[in-house]
Amino acid sequence: MDTGTHHLQELLTRTHTGVRPSKPHSSSETYSRESLLLRLNGRSSFRTSISPEESKFLHEWNGTFPTETYGAYLLSWHRALVASGTPVSFIDNSSLLYDSVEIQGKRLQCIALKGALHYEERNRLIKKRAPYRFERPIDFYDSRLQKSCPLCQHVAEAQDSQLLNKKASGSVILSLGDHVLLPNRFPTLPGASLFLSTSHDDMSSRVKLSEKISAKELIIPAEGKTRSRIIDRRDFVKLFALCDALSCVAMRNHVLEGQSIPTHDHFHVFPSEIIPESFVLSIIGSESKLPLFEAKGTPFSTLCVTGSTPDEIASIATSILQRMEEQNEVYTLAYAYRHLFISSRWSKKIGSMPVRIGCGLPLHYFDPSNRYFLALILKYCPLAGEYRWGRFLT
Ligand SMILES: [Zn+2]
């Protein structure tokens, strides 16, 4: 074992010395930092045998994602990714760079992801991947699954593996009751994961957009139906607690804005270092004492929801988003440093034709050198002060 590997093991062991498992499975306690780290390190092999490849990976990214904070998470992510069949070399060329662009006569600082596979190329690989063959009849799984859904396939593979005691059960980072944290099988960065329900979306109250995706007119859903899923408050509470505990950020697209698997709702989760706290605070602008305010440090219309607990933020956000969804609005979400950012779009311009600006916008996490992308932003994204948030607040 080399010295670096030994040091990492010491660090991970020290991080968890004296921490005992908390009482299992009651809301916030289950998702404290200590309990989640314990579960990440649950398998004894985590502390006793870090392979040279894993050690090299953690060292290489230590400058961006310090091992002291992210070691347990990234190690678990690395192992889950490899177990799910994706080599970690997938992200070899990825890097994060500060860049800037002028919008409305003002210089805007961005954090750009460079070197990752382009969206079309990633989609080509996703389609090329052989679908998982379910080991059991669909009704025998622990959750409601759909065989053609890539996310359900990942969940089924984990459930089959657990039942049959196969190695691939390690392809899950964390099981969180009826949710799961999985490595993104086509990651853009270390720690790129997906938080999702173990059940496929209930589509009975949704419009099936895929049947009408080429339609140019605005689809008005029938009474009682929506286009994206209405997010349950409990989903938010769990996700925010997870992000706070593991020092992560989360982002979510809309079915008409960047979501590649529109019938199985999911959040993208990353180590929060991709967007440092000082950068996010500059987007928020002058700190507000209110739980709800429009961000001041960004040219884009962005509603911020904050609170002292995940539950407080979730309670406010859920009702706003339900109203937005019921009024056929298109929006994306980002959660970082105890703030939920709701980023609006000109939904009538989008109509029923999905756009792909994506959920990085409110955190200025996009590549400003992409002129096509900038043109999309200027066409579809209201600027600060232009969007009428009041419609959704009462
Ligand atoms: Zn699914």
Image (tube, rainbow, N blue to C red):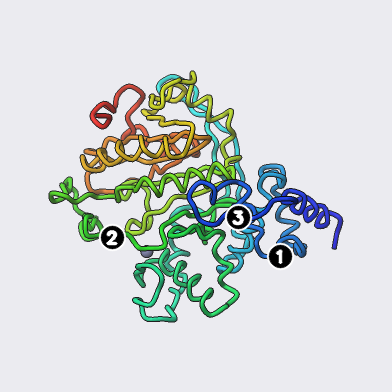
Q: Are marks 3 and 1 in contact (CB under 8 Å)?
A: no
Q: Is residue 342 left or right of residue 346?
A: right
Q: Classify the position of the C terminus by image quarter.
A: top left
Q: Is residue 374 above or below residue 171?
A: above
For marks 3 and 1 on the same chain, the one whose residue lies earlier in the sequence:
1
- Residue type at the position of mark 3: Ile
Q: In the rendered image, which residue does mark 3 sit on?
A: 91
For marks 1 and 2 on the same chain, the one whose residue lies earlier in the sequence:
1
Real-space Cα separation, disc 2 to disc 3, in angstroms: 33 Å
Q: Quadrant of residue 65?
A: top right
Residue 9, position as x, y percentages in the image: 78, 56
Q: Is residue 91 left or right of residue 365?
A: right
Is disc 3 placed on a helix, strand or loop?
Answer: helix
Is disc 1 placed on a helix, strand or loop?
Answer: loop
Residue visible at 41% across and 58% down in the picture: 197
In front: label 1 or label 2: 1
For ligand 1, tell me if the residue under mark 1 lies within 8 Å.
Answer: no
In front: label 3 or label 1: 1
- The crowd level at tag 1 (other Cα within 10 Å; few <14, some 14-19, many 20+) is few
Residue visible at 44% across and 25% down in the picture: 298
Q: Which mark is residue 276?
A: none
- The crowd level at tag 2 (other Cα within 10 Å; few <14, some 14-19, many 20+) is few
- Residue type at the position of mark 1: Ser
Residue 79, position as x, y percentages in the image: 63, 63
Q: Are marks 1 and 2 in contact (CB under 8 Å)?
A: no
Real-space Cα separation, disc 3 to disc 1, in angstroms: 27 Å
Is disc 2 placed on a helix, strand or loop?
Answer: loop
- Residue type at the position of mark 2: Asp
Q: Is residue 164 above or below residue 31?
A: below
Q: In the rendered image, which residue does mark 2 sit on?
A: 202
Q: In the rendered image, which residue does mark 1 sit on?
A: 44
In front: label 2 or label 3: 2
